[in-house]
């Protein structure tokens, strides 16, 4: 438990400090990836080395992808966050610093977008909830949030849903065991303790 709190406190401190970002800043990479995943799903053809390395152009259709209103609003909000955080990602490179943390986004029907801060629930005490790949009860079930798990909330909520990282047995040094969207409702769920 102490290890989880120490690691989580370090993680939330880094995320909650919107200073001038470096080119390989994890938050900037996260925002860039989420924004471009939305474009990729709309058929966008990437020309930058980073875009081509991260997304498959074999099925792309356009350099001017048309986004649905909800996705266009999400992209506009991401761009605003990138500007607020002074992101200036070098798209001439072909790698991301923490690609494993971004990989779960690909299996989500609704793309999660990282927020500047994070909150943790240590020892969840609510009912078993279904983890889904989108912010809707119609989205595919991909797991469960069970009592006793520790949860990290570090992404924008969407339509009353939260994208969470789940540690089923408390903190694990190799990262969360699962990710997904869960309908927890307003405010924080019942937990043994909170961090962030």
Image (cartoon, rainbow, N blue to C red):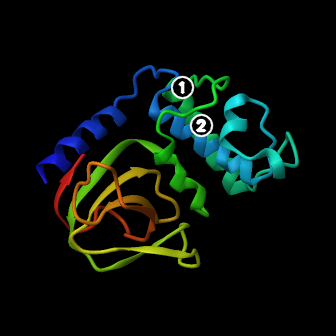
Q: Residue at x 44, y 19 (%)?
A: 20
Q: Which residue is mark 2?
A: 32
Q: Where 93 falls versus 115 (above or below)?
A: above
Q: Where 128 falls versus 183 (above or below)?
A: below
Give the position of the N terminus as an image quadrant: bottom left
Residue 170: image location, x then y, percent: 22, 60
CA gap between label 2 and label 1 equals: 9 Å
Residue 50: image location, x then y, percent: 67, 32
Q: Which residue is mark 1?
A: 87
170 relative position to 31: left or right: left
Q: Are marks 2 and 1 in contact (CB under 8 Å)?
A: yes
**Along the viewing direction, whichever of 149 and 193 lies nearer the viewer:** 149
Q: Residues within 10 Å of mark 1 (few under 14, many from 20)?
A: many
Residue 37: image location, x then y, percent: 65, 48
Q: Which quadrant would residue 121 be assigned to in this image? A: bottom left
Q: Earlier in the sequence, mark 2 or mark 1?
A: 2
Query: How many circles with numbers are drawn on the protein?
Result: 2
Q: Residue at x 67, y 23 (%)?
A: 92
Q: Which quadrant would residue 183 be assigned to in this image? A: bottom left
**Along the viewing direction, whichever of 182 and 59 lies nearer the viewer:** 59
Q: Residue at x 47, y 45 (%)?
A: 114
Q: Which mark is residue 27?
A: none
137 relative position to 58: left or right: left
Residue with the most extreme left position: 2
Q: Secondary structure at mark 1?
A: loop
100 relative position to 186: left or right: right
Q: Secondary structure at mark 2?
A: helix
Give the position of the C terminus as an image quadrant: top left
Residue 168: image location, x then y, percent: 28, 66
Q: Where 30 falls versus 73 (above or below)?
A: above
**Along the viewing direction, whichever of 86 and 69 lies nearer the viewer:** 86
72 relative position to 170: left or right: right
């Amino acid at each position: 438990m102490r290890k989880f709190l120490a690691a989580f406190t370090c993680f939330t401190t880094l995320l909650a400090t919107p200073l001038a970002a470096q080119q390989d800043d994890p938050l900037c990479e996260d925002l860039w990836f989420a924004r471009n995943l939305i474009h990729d799903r709309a058929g966008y053809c990437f020309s930058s080395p980073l875009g081509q390395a991260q997304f498959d152009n074999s099925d792309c259709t356009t350099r001017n992808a048309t986004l649905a209103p909800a996705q266009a609003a999400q992209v506009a909000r991401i761009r605003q966050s990138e500007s607020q955080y002074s992101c200036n990602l070098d798209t001439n490179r072909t790698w991301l610093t923490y690609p494993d943390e971004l990989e779960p986004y690909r299996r989500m029907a609704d793309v999660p977008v990282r927020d500047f801060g994070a909150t943790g629930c240590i020892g969840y005490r609510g009912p078993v909830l279904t983890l889904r790949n989108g912010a809707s009860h119609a989205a595919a079930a991909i797991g469960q949030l069970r009592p006793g798990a520790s949860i990290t909330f570090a992404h924008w909520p969407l339509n009353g849903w939260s994208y969470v990282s789940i540690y089923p047995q408390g903190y694990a040094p190799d990262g969360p065991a699962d990710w997904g969207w869960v309908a927890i409702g307003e405010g924080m769920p019942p937990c043994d303790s909170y961090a962030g």
